[in-house]
């Protein structure tokens, strides 16, 4: 199960006009991550893990780190393709299977030990690209509604060369967001900020309070 996250009560300003609007939405940013406790907890575990990735006894983690070292001198667009394919090799496993709970956001070390569900793939890709030299401002974990399958899902959005590329555990091909018609974003987040998304046109008012998304989440 994907996180049933509460976006919280806030009034935020639209994102800078210089950045592409993700999935053609109107974006509203806040730097407050308190409404996403699972994401904050995962960031804390990631910070602790990074001190021992290079010395891990896990074969999977060692292979992952070797891939990162091999890819560091490649073009960033090629790194995206390689990272997406590499992470997608892991078998999908639900949180109920791995952790006996409906919703858990795994760190990379946990993912490579147990595999995971959609947000766990996206988190592993996020950390991988950060280790390769991508800036946090280039990356967002995006919680979306898959309007074809009628369920919640998570992907990684990467801002590169004036476009946004989507890395998805159900597709080994990276796609520009303008070509992805099946997803409508609920919210997106990186280690510094989170964004609420409203459907265009921008004239439609965005409420000050963003409601709980509990009823919208299902298996992904």
Image (spheres, rainbow, N blue to C red):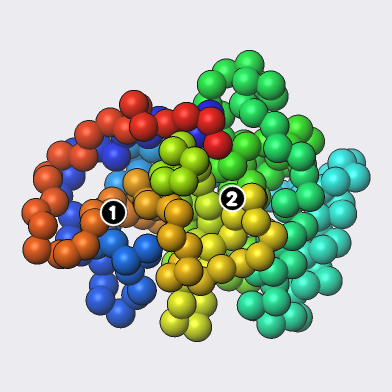
Left or right of residue 42: residue 112: right
Q: How far across and how far down the image is residue 47, in percent? A: 60, 47
Q: Residue at x 13, y 51 (%)?
A: 206
Label 2 SS: helix
Instruction: Give the labeled residue for mark 2.
Output: 122
Q: Is residue 220 above or below residue 13?
A: above
Nearest the camera: 55 or 151?
151
Q: At 37% from the left edge and 63% from the top edge, which residue is drawn?
A: 23
Residue at image location 44% in from the left, 38% down from the top:
150
Q: Quadrant of the C terminus?
A: top right
From what the image shows, is residue 164 above or below residue 127?
A: below
Name the side, left or right, on which 2 lies relative to 203. Answer: right
Q: Secondary structure at mark 1?
A: strand
What's the mark number on residue 197? Answer: 1
Is residue 112 shown to the viewer in this render? yes
| Residue pictured at 77% horizontal, 72% vertical | 71
Say if 102 sits above or below 107 in the image: above
- Looking at the picture, tell me which residue is in the foreground, 47 or 27: 27
């Amino acid at each position: 199960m994907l996180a049933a996250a509460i976006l919280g009560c806030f009034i935020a300003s639209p994102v800078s006009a210089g950045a592409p609007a993700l999935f053609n939405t109107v974006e509203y940013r806040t730097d407050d991550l308190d409404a996403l406790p699972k994401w904050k907890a995962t960031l804390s575990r990631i910070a602790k893990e990074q001190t021992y990735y290079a010395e891990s006894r896990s074969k999977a983690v060692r292979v992952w780190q070797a891939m990162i070292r091999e890819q560091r001198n490649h073009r960033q667009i090629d790194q995206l393709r390689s990272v997406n394919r590499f992470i997608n090799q892991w078998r999908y496993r639900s949180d109920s299977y791995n952790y006996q709970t409906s919703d858990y956001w795994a760190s990379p070390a946990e993912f490579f030990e147990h595999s995971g569900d959609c947000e766990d793939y996206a988190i592993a890709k996020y950390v991988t690209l950060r280790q390769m030299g991508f800036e946090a401002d280039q990356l967002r974990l995006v919680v979306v509604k898959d309007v074809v399958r009628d369920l919640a899902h998570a992907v990684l959005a990467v801002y590169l060369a004036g476009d946004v590329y989507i890395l998805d555990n159900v597709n080994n091909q990276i796609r520009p967001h303008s070509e992805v018609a099946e997803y409508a974003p609920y919210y997106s987040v990186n280690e510094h900020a989170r964004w609420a998304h409203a459907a265009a046109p921008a004239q439609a008012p965005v409420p000050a309070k963003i409601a709980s998304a509990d009823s919208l989440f299902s298996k992904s």
